[in-house]
Image: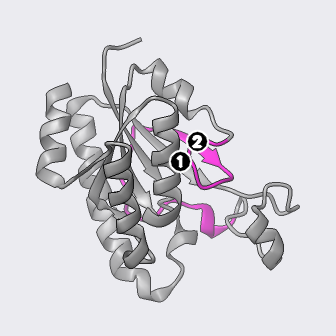
Amino acid sequence: MTELSTAVVFIDLQEGFFEDPSSRDDRELMVAESNRLAGLARQARVPVFVVSTVHARDTSTWTLKMLEDDQGFNFPGTPEVRLLEGLNLEPATHLEKIRDSAFHGTTLAQQLRTVGARTVILAGVLAESCVAATGRDAFAHDFRVVYARQAIASAEAETGWPMLEGLSGTLRQQILNRPDLERLLTADA
C-alpha cells in the first residue's frame, strides 16, 4: 500500500448524461475541466477512479424511478455508456455502478483504502444526484470529501449546488476551485 492520501473520483462522464443538445457547452466544459484535473492528478501521482453507470436491459438493475417510468438507459454496448469524447483520464481504475452513489454495490471504498486514500476529490455529473450521493456515502465510509467546483455539472443549478453547499457545511466537505485543488494535489506529490 502506498502512502498517498488523496484520490480523484470521476462520476458518470458518459454520453448518456449529455444527450440533450442544450448540454453541448456543459459537455465541452466538463471534458476540459476533467482533463485538467486528471492531468494534475497524474503530475501528483494521485490515483484516478472513473465510475460509470451501466444498467442491464432486463430491468434487474433499474432504480424504482426507472421501473415506474418503464424506461432504462445506459445499457452495455450502447453509445450512451461510452465516456465523453475527448476525455483523457488515464491511467485510471474503472468501476461500474447501478445507483447514484459510486459506493453502492461497488468496490470503490476498498480500492480507495488499498491505495491509501483518506480524501476523495469528486468530479462529474450530476451535482444534485450522483455527486451528492457519492459525497454522502464517502462520509459514511470515513473519507474526507472535496468537490471540484469547475469539474462538476448540474442539470438543476438551483438545487444541485445548494445541495453540495449543504453537505459542505453539515459534513465538513470542501468545495474547491481550480487553484485550491492544484495546491491540494501538489501537497501529495
Q: Nearer the viewer, residue 75 or 63?
A: 63
Q: Which residue is mark 2?
A: 95
Q: Residue furthest front?
A: 170
Magenta stretch mostly in which secondary structure? loop
Q: Is residue 177 visible?
A: yes
Name the residue rendered at 37%, 48% in the picture. 170
Image-quadrant location for residue 104 = top right
Q: Is residue 103 magenta?
A: yes
Q: Is residue 106 magenta?
A: no
Mark 2–mark 1 Cα distance, whole angstroms, equals 5 Å
Name the residue rendered at 53%, 70% in the picture. 17
Residue 97: x percent and y percent?
64, 48
Residue 156: x percent and y percent?
44, 77
Q: Which mark is residue 37?
A: none
Q: Nearer the viewer, residue 32 or 51?
A: 51
Q: Earlier in the sequence, mark 2 or mark 1?
A: 1
**Residue 88 higher or lower than 47, as above or below:** below
Boundaries of the magenta span: 78-104
Q: Amino acid at mark 2?
A: Leu
The N terminus lies in quadrant: top left
SS at mark 2? strand
Q: Residue furthest top?
A: 1
Circles 2 and 1, Cβ within 8 Å, touching? The answer is yes
Q: Which mark is residue 51?
A: 1
Label 2: few (<14), some (14–19) or many (≥20) C-alpha neighbours in 10 Å: some
Residue 117: x percent and y percent?
38, 25
